[in-house]
Image: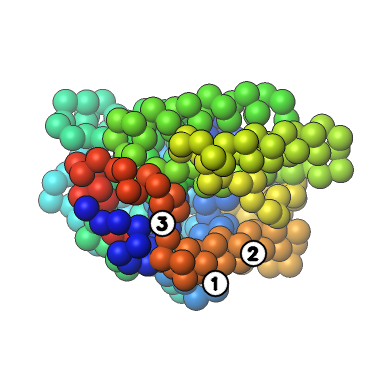
Amino acid sequence: MTTARDAAPKRRTIALMNQKGGVGKTTTAVNLAAAIAAQGRRVCLIDLDPQAHASLHVGVDPATCAHTVYDLLVDDDVRASDVRRTVAEHLDVIPAEVDLAAAETELASVPDRQRILLRKLAPIAADYEFIFIDCPPSLGLLTVNALSFAREVFVPMQAHFLALQGVSKLLETVGMVCRSVNPSLCVTGIVLCMHEANTTLAKEIVADLDAFFEAARDTDVPWRTCRVLRPAIRRNIKLAEAPSFGKTVLEYEPWCPGALDYRKLAERVIRDFDAMRERREAPAIETVRTARPIVTDDVPAT
Ligand SMILES: Nc1ncnc2c1ncn2[C@@H]1O[C@H](COP(=O)(O)OP(=O)(O)OP(=O)(O)O)[C@@H](O)[C@H]1O
Ligand SMILES: [Mg+2]
């Protein structure tokens, strides 16, 4: 079994997850991936949502794809290298399509169906320093596959009361998945989306979240290293307009507040990765040490 001190982590594999719809998962997956790639880091964006919004957002029409992540999951002969497409310098995407919704039922009787993505992506993982997975707004088999493969979860959310309730439910779910399929998984970031920093409610929720995660530091829950990431992403109409042009916000309106926020967040995510590598440290050292062999053997080296 690999220990955290054996080698510096080679990549961050991050699932963007929140079972609540419309919170900014896709917007964050796409624009963060693009902003990191623009810094010269090798990035892969995996669209695991049958809505295929991330694919469309980066200008890939699933109808024109010979293969998508659906084929990757259901067809043994399809390899990840057959499916990925380069959409910008340093940025590849594995697109989704609407048929992906059927994968949940088609795979229902397949042994080890929770780890197909892990097995299929292992051969290409070494090509990237950052892998982002855009999850659907549900906790079905597709999301479980994402969580089996990822080492980290970012939770995009909005700072209001119901979101705070949702986040504790979500954290419980992640805890459950950790125990069953991937003990290496950690929630490492909350991304505040459509943020209105000047409202009293938003300020209170952010303070509550900070305190909640601070209190988790010395525990062994899978969110003990989680932080509310800064900057928060401001509400900005350009972020909502960009997808209909099949462009990331960096291409669509490079100096709008949304582009600036995602660029700064990208710098933070890169900085944390470089610091982790410097310290030769996985996102949650303790978990790596105690991971059960069946999972640590499967997880591509990170
Ligand atoms: N910071 C922002 N400012 C303004 N609009 C935003 C911002 N972030 C996201 N949006 C818009 O809000 C809507 C929902 O965002 P997004 O699609 O990223 O959420 P999601 O969590 O992926 O949704 P789903 O659960 O359906 O997959 C989209 O129309 C998007 O363009
Ligand atoms: Mg989405």
Q: Position of residue 227 (x, y in %)?
A: 61, 46
N-terminal-most mark, 1 or 3: 1
Q: Are marks 1 and 2 in contact (CB under 8 Å)?
A: yes
Left or right: 13, with 193 as reference point: left
Could you say which is closer to the camera, residue 136 or residue 57?
A: 136
Determine the CA span between mark 1 and mark 3: 24 Å
Q: Amino acid at mark 3?
A: Ala
In which quarter of the view is residue 216 placed? top right
**Residue at image x 27%, y 62%?**
124
Q: Position of residue 131 (x, y in %)?
A: 41, 57
**Residue at image x 80%, y 42%?**
196
Left or right: 152, with 108 as reference point: right
Mark 1 or 3, which is nearer the eye? 3
Q: Residues within 10 Å of mark 2 (few under 14, many from 20)?
A: many
Q: Is residue 108 above or below residue 204?
A: above
Q: Position of residue 110 (x, y in %)?
A: 16, 31
